[in-house]
Image (tube, rainbow, N blue to C red):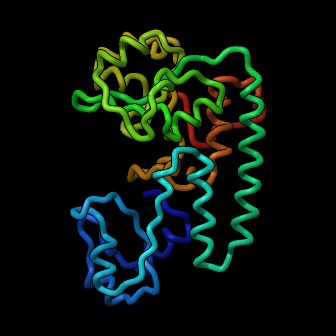
Amino acid sequence: MLQPPAVNEKVQKNQLAEVGNAGSLKLEKILELAPDLVTTYGTGNPQTDAHPKLLEAGIKVAIVAEYMESTPLGQAEWMKFLALFFNREAEAEQSFAEIRQRYQEIAAKAKTVNRRPTVFSGFDRKGTWYAPGGDSYVAKFLADAGANYLWADDRSTGSLQLTFEQVYDRAAQAQYWIVNAHSVKTRADLLAADPRYQGFAALGTNNVFSPTAKVNPQGGNDYWQSGIANPDIILADLVKIFHPELVPDHQFVYYRQLP
């Protein structure tokens, strides 16, 4: 996990306690710490959810569920929920209003384009190609960036499980490919993982991009952390990919082009 400098400093000084994750919760340690509140998430799976155990132990719990939102702005708006616990509601309201305005201004620019380049996402993992559903927040990002996501007609808000053949039939000639995997650093890595990727036109035209520009040596990716609170910057990155003339002064923050 990528942490802010202040948090890393506390880790180095052993000022933070390790309490495990939902699947291996150190409940006794949490009880010893006696926190006023524990924030966690829920999946509906009793084998992995932490909050039932915490509530049973008498600990106050707040479930943060931004990942269930189907739009980037919907995810970012969860900052208002977290701000409540620190009496910083007004600051969160102002911050979100500014983020929303910047996001909408960038999306408005992309809406004026005459061409919407085709794009697909994901990659094959042990025989299954995981791709964003057509009603997911990722698909919303791509639409707002002026791209034609090839699974936009799908109505899923989560992840699609496709075969390589299904993806190849639809995306072999797509102009862009978005790959989200910190283990894939170059196009050569893709080919080493599966030589069949050579058949995708986007690979041959050097139009493969990945949201892994801010990854630490341990594999923590800031796209999944600060990126959630900065959808306007992620959108600007995507517009830079598909329509660079619209944001000539923008420099990539979360995305990078695979060499």
Q: Residue placed at 59% from the left, 51% from the top?
A: 74
Query: Residue 84: horizontal and vertical position, in percent?
Result: 61, 75
Query: Residue 162: horizontal and vertical position, in percent?
Result: 31, 26
Q: Is residue 62 above or below residue 131?
A: below
Q: Residue placed at 56% from the left, 37% from the top?
A: 255
Q: Nearer the viewer, residue 140 or 200?
A: 140
Quadrant containing the N terminus is: bottom left
Q: Residue placed at 48% from the left, 47% from the top?
A: 215
Q: Nearer the viewer, residue 206 or 241?
A: 241
Image check: 33 left or right of 118?
A: left
Q: Is residue 140 above or below residue 90?
A: above
Query: Can residue 259 be spotted in the picture?
Result: no
Image check: 226 left or right of 130?
A: right
Image check: 27 left or right of 39?
A: left
Query: Can residue 104 be spotted in the picture?
Result: yes
Quarter occupied by residue 110: top right
